[in-house]
Image (cartoon, rainbow, N blue to C red):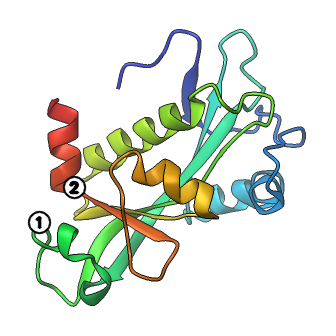
Amino acid sequence: MAQHPDFRIEVLASHHDRANFWCGVDDLDRYLKAQAGQDIRRKANGVFVLVAPAQPDTVLGYYTLCATSVSQGEVPPAARKSIPRYPLVSAILIGRLAVSGTKQGQHLGAMLLADAVHRAYASTSTIGASMMVVDAINERAISFYESHGFVRLPESLRLVLPMDVIKQLLRA
């Protein structure tokens, strides 16, 4: 994916300043500060950070990706037509996505999400996944993901986006 010249998305590394990241959601702040490094070392999550080239150590936002599965019965009918009929459907989970409180409202969340979608789709050529899944933290986050094509699972904060829909989006 071509990145915006004012920003770069890269794998979280030791030089990134995690201690001063603040997005306003304690769980997301705490994860980046205390857990993200361990998850990378343990291969539990891929953690990707948004930085400005002029300040490459300052984390402006981040997201995580990992493998997961969803029960066939949980998949909404709108998404079911494009996935295999296995009891468990392979997927890529966006576990967390956060933007620094000082940068919110500048469409950086959409930039992070676009990068996550591109990365996830690219990985399907080597590791199968029929959809992307996200566990939204609240109704505001649900609205954000729905505005980007994700479909909400019934009575849940979980949303899905089938890979064939992603393929169509990337072609457009």
Q: Amino acid at mark 1?
A: Ser
Q: Residue at x 84, y 59 (%)?
A: 26
Q: Is residue 133 rendered to the left or right of residue 98? A: left
SS at circle 2: helix
Residue 105, image x, y percentages: 66, 30
x and y, in percent, of residue 139 in the image: 60, 62
Q: Nearer the viewer, residue 146 or 82?
A: 146
Q: CA distance from mark 1 to mark 2?
A: 8 Å
Label 1 belongs to which residue? Answer: 82
All told, the count of numbered labels is 2
Residue 80 versus residue 84: which sits nearer the camera? Answer: 80
Query: From the image, which quarter does the N terminus lie in?
Result: top left
Residue at 41%, 46% (x, y): give it.
Answer: 147
Left or right of residue 1, residue 111 in this image: right
Whether residue 3 appears in this view of the structure is yes
- Which is more toward the observer, 29 or 110? 110
Badge 1: residue crowd in 10 Å (few <14, some 14–19, many ≥20): some
Tag 2: Cα neighbours inside 10 Å, few (<14), some, or many (≥20)? many
Q: Residue at horizontal 56%, vertical 66%? A: 44
Counting residues from the start of the chain, the first of labels 1 and 2 encountered is 1
Residue 112 rendering spot, x and y as whole percentages: 52, 37
Rendered location of residue 67, percent (x, y): 41, 67
Give yes or no for contact between labels 1 and 2 (Cβ–Cβ under 8 Å). yes
- The tag on residue 163 is 2
Describe the element under mark 1 as helix, strand or loop.
Answer: loop
Residue 14 as seen in the image, left or right of residue 76: right
- Examine the image and state in which quarter residue 16 appears: top right
Name the residue: 35% across, 77% down. Answer: 69
- In terms of depth relative to the viewer, which is nearer, 46 or 131? 131
Horizontal side of 1 relative to 170 (left or right) equals right
From what the image shows, is residue 22 above or below residue 73?
above
